[in-house]
Amino acid sequence: MLTSQEQLRYGRQIMLKDIGESGQLKLQSASILIVGMGGLGCPVSLYLASAGIGKLIVCDGDVVESTNLQRQVLFNENDIGNNKAEVAQEKLSQQNSFIDIEGIDEMFNDELAEELLPEVDLVIDCTDNLATRYLMNRYCHQFQVPLIIGAATSLSGQTMLIRTHEGHACYQCLFPESDQQVEENCQTLGILGPILAIVAGMQALTAIKLLTGNPVNDSQLQLFDGLSQTWQTIGLQRQANCQVCG
């Protein structure tokens, strides 16, 4: 049962027929791992903390830099030089004292994957590193944990829900890993802050819908064009020769 304080705090979403008190209780019992506390991780974590996710684990070994402040909305000038995950843990705890926040000041790796994934209901990819994304994809398939991919550069973004344990395509099906891949991110292509907010909002929305048992889009790559302000959806199929889920 929700306390009177919780009913008051989350009242605007509890009144939604697709959430209700039962949905709120599902959110409160959920545990989510967010990998990367940059331009996507900051708004994703704020929305999920505000929504009342029971436990958020935020993972990032990087420190706040002045160049981050244009888009990483959790941080300010006083945070420069401090670890992103630790700063995020403190600020998200101030945002919602009803939930549990754990900050991990390390870059996501095999050891952390094996330690954390058995404990969580969902992983949200908020990195700008392809190697880390492929790592998450492999371990989420291994531990049968849903993964919400997100990426944004320049004036475009993309997001995708991966549930390979239900027979859907994985990230490797869509973008086969190659030694010749060129890493493109905000450092090389630039980024406009609101693009990240839009993609992050879609990631947070997908997470809330998934955890509350509402319909979600599986095996679909959703692409956002910031210039035309339009979305395009591309249907995906599991590849029989995929090295991860085939």
Image (spheres, rainbow, N blue to C red):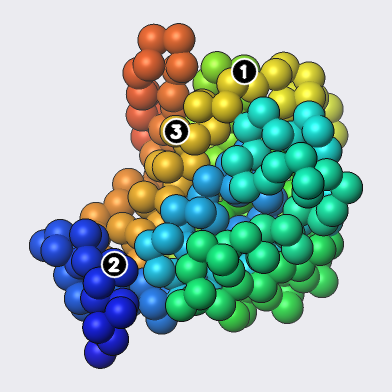
Q: Residue 169 versus residue 25: which sits nearer the camera? A: 25
Q: Secondary structure at mark 3?
A: helix
Instruction: Say if residue 181 shows up in the picture.
Output: no
Residue visible at 45% across and 10% down in the picture = 227
- The amino acid sitting under disc 1 is Ser
Name the residue carrying label 2: 10
Q: Residues within 10 Å of mark 1 (few under 14, many from 20)?
A: some
Name the residue tied to disc 1: 154
What is the secondary structure assignment of the residue under circle 1? loop
Residue mark closest to the camera, 2 vs 1 = 2
Drawn side of residue 227 relative to residue 15, left or right = right
Q: Quadrant of residue 225?
A: top left
Q: Residue furthest left?
A: 17
Which numbered disc flags the more N-terminal residue, 2 or 3? 2
Relative image position of residue 57 (x, y in whole percent): 63, 68
Q: Which residue is mark 3?
A: 198
Q: Position of residue 74 (x, y in %)?
A: 62, 47
Q: Is residue 32 above or below residue 223?
A: below
Q: Quadrant of residue 9?
A: bottom left
> Of circles 2 and 3, which is in front?
2
Does label 2 or label 1 sit earlier along the sequence? 2
Whichever of callouts 3 and 1 sits on the residue coming sooner in the sequence is: 1
Is residue 244 found left or right of 208 in the rendered image?
right
Which residue is at 73% across, 78% downward? 115
Q: Amino acid at mark 3?
A: Ile
C-alpha distance separating marks 3 and 1: 13 Å
Q: Examine the rendered structure and indicate whether residue 232 appears above or below residue 236.
A: above
Residue 218 visible in image: yes
Using the image as rendered, state which of residue 86 and residue 183 is in the foreground. 86
Furthest residue to the front? Answer: 78
The secondary element bearing badge 2 is classed as loop
Which image quadrant is residue 12 in?
A: bottom left
